[in-house]
Image (cartoon, rainbow, N blue to C red):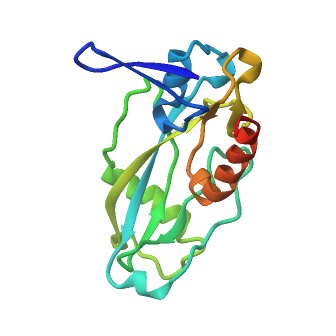
Amino acid sequence: MNISILDTDGSSFDFTSRYAINSAGLEAEKIARMTGIDDPQYKTWFWKGEYFALLNGKHKLINRLVYPVPEPNTTGLGIHTTPDLAGRQKLEPNTIFLEDGKIDYSVDPAHAKEFYQKASRFLPFLEPGDLASDQAGIRPKLQKPGDPARDFIILEEEKRGFPGLVNLIGIESPGLTAALSIGNYVRSLLKKYD
């Protein structure tokens, strides 16, 4: 496969590879279009998820993931707990559709009330003052509000005339958990080019 990349200074960089893997996260749809694949099934929608940290020593009362019973037709797993590498606990994430597609990593402190209401159902020791704005992330989903849930797209593009190109589109947070399995699957797709 011959690949040409236009650098920021306008110069072209050309190279050859047996295969290429588009795993560009939020930009994966854009990268696919740059190769000439403009498939409406590859359309991604951005969803923000905010995180709130547990304060006042409440993080010491749990040391693992705690998930609520999923809500029907949800666009996420629901607000749940996650320990971080610093020994803290976070409540995460809500799901905010970014209709304009604009990347926004701000956290609205007013959303602490929603986090408290949802998390206090399974963390009865929680009080409203135990939460502080922490961080936000953006997920590329393959659906907008009201659409049925869709799974990740992991596709080798030989049938479209791009042998050795694998597109990974709409890989959101469960993709990190499944990264090793996804990597093994992508490798199996490319074995025929070795």
Q: Position of residue 147 (x, y in %)?
A: 70, 30
Towards the viewer: 67 or 126:
67
Query: In this view of the protein, can residue 97 be seen by the observer?
Result: no
| Quadrant assignment, res 71 | bottom right
The quarter of the image holding the C terminus is top right
Q: Position of residue 157 (x, y in %)?
A: 70, 24
164 sits to left or right of 60? right
Q: Position of residue 130 (x, y in %)?
A: 36, 73
Q: Which residue is outermost to the left?
A: 9
Residue at 48% x, 60% y: name it: 92
Q: Position of residue 12 (x, y in %)?
A: 34, 15
| Quadrant assignment, res 9 | top left
31 sits to left or right of 104? right
Residue at 63% x, 24% y: name it: 42
Towards the viewer: 76 or 156:
156
Query: In this view of the protein, can residue 117 be seen by the observer?
Result: yes
The quarter of the image holding the N terminus is top right
Residue at 63% x, 44% y: name it: 75
The image shows a total of numbered marks equal to: 0
Residue at 57% x, 28% y: name it: 44
Is 75 drawn above or below residue 123 in the view shown?
above
100 sits to left or right of 79? left
Is 27 drawn above or below residue 55 in the view shown?
above
Is 153 drawn above or below residue 106 in the view shown?
above
